[in-house]
Image: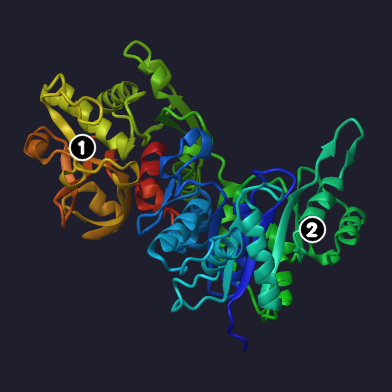
Amino acid sequence: METQTKYIFITGGVVSSLGKGIISASIGKLLQARGYAVTIQKFDPYINIDPGTLNPYEHGECYVTMDGMETDLDLGHYERFTDIHTTRHNSITTGRIYKTVIDRERRGDYLGKTIQVVPHITDEIKRRMLREDEPDKQLDFVITEVGGTIGDIESAPFMEAIRQLRWQLGRNAVNVHLTYVPYLKAAEEMKTKPTQHSVKELQGMGIQPDILVLRTERHLDDAMRMKVASFCNVDLDCVILSEDKPSIYEVPVSMMAQGLDTAILRKTGRPIGDISMQSWLDFLDKQHHATREIHIGLVGKYDLQDAYKSIRESLNLAGVYNNVKAMLHFINSEQISKENVAEQLQGMDGIVICPGFGQRGIEGKILTAEYTRTHDIPTFGICLGMQMMVIEFARNVLGYADANSREMDEQTSHNVIDMMEEQKAITDKGGTMRLGAYECELREDSLVYEMYGRKKTIMERHRHRYEFNNAYKEDYESHGMKCVGINPAADLVEIVEIPCHQWYIGTQFHPEYLSTVLHPHPLFMSFCKACIR
């Protein structure tokens, strides 16, 4: 049997936001279900080194890998679909490519040569696409999604790198091109001309797509597919429809039914074999049959679905496994006041106090924490959300009226949240965070110990700079807020809970990064159970 790694390049045309990430994740899932070892990587054309400093309104959620890389939110889709753990090698930006090349030039590695986009930038892109930094990792397929749209100036070096690799790798590489087929209401017609132009532009760059995935809100008949196949030089069975679905988790099943994975295997010369998707189908069956609703409020300051993407998906997944639909309601923390907090939270079965950075909207989060604590409403505080729960408790239970975080008020006399010692001398925004997976030891007399299946030690991912101030730990404990999860290396508080409350838990880490379709996170599972009760 052939063992050479195969490479799948996912590109997009006509418009952005067509769902290349979902298609990439679906391909990964299907190949994995046929017994192949896969990984998925994202190449983004923007100049930033990573999305860590980007505004959530502009870029959505910043996803964090196990090894502490801040990445595009599509890596969350990759992990939720496939259960693989991505690393810094799975997320590359133009900024990282250029920085690597410029650093080499400054060291003299190029021996005085003129540094150019071709070959130096494209060679570095190819090196990353081939994952030469991980030569010992045996993979059957490497799926590479290229961000942006064909024709973008920024993506030209990536397209040239793919063109070269297609020539070098032969049948070991395929291109899957995702385009949009619009429906013109006035003419009552689907229009394939944008797809034809997109493929023509791709061909002009020296790349002939092997498979076309047509994003459409309406069904295309075989005559329309034949037209696309003929004009674009693609086999008819390689023209795949990506129609709107009630859930993104139905996309892999739709792709499987149309033979997307088998087309890839056929073109790369790999055996098709059997497929094992039963656990995925069982999940979809649960999703279809869940009729009861629970209403969960997301209290945050970013009024954008993608800003809390992993939290939303984690709640949706946990809801399905609890046989309910999690109906999520964004509640803007900037608009919460002491006078209207009850009205703002009315009708919610549970509240998630969302993560974030900066002072805007924090008082609304603190008021939320007070209301849910005093009214015994299930409450889940994540990262900054946990810190707001700690500050609220200090102000209203411990009696420290000016309690705050040093991030928000450097003059506070009760800094119950403070910066980590090792971070105080760092001024570079890209280096001020505690990022990636760290150990957390759970107290055996805690609620979370039971939620995690009585595990003593867990690993969770972080993205923060400020911490619970251990100088106040004894005071919190004696008044009922227990510090039940501790990082053993640094003695940092990772989890707080109030045991007498039906569900009032805050985590300094981000559990949403570890919740997947087939393995929902235990904290979200337990939280949804509490919301049902």
Q: Where's residue 357, x and y in %?
A: 35, 33
Q: Quadrant of the C terminus?
A: top left
Residue at the far front: name it.
112
Q: How many residues crowd around disc 1 within 10 Å: few (fewer than 14), some, or many (20 or more)?
A: many
Q: Position of residue 257 (x, y in %)?
A: 73, 63
- Which residue is rendered at x = 88% and y = 53% of the image? 221
Pick whichever of labels 2 and 1 is earlier in the sequence.
2
The structure residue drawn at horizontal position 66% and vertical position 61%, both measured from the top left corner, is 160
Secondary element type, mark 1: loop
Camera-nearest residue between 231 and 188:
231
Q: Is residue 401 above or below residue 415?
A: above
Quadrant, the N terminus = bottom right
Q: Is residue 314 above or below residue 235?
A: above
Measured as percent of width and height from the top left, residue 386 is found at 28, 37
| Residue that carries the numbered disc 1 in the rendered image | 498
Please identify the quarter of the rendering in which residue 200 is found.
Answer: bottom right
**What is the distance, in whole Å, between disc 2 and disc 1 at their CAs?**
63 Å
Q: Mark 2 or mark 1: which is in front?
A: 2
Numbered tag placed on residue 204 in the rendering:
2
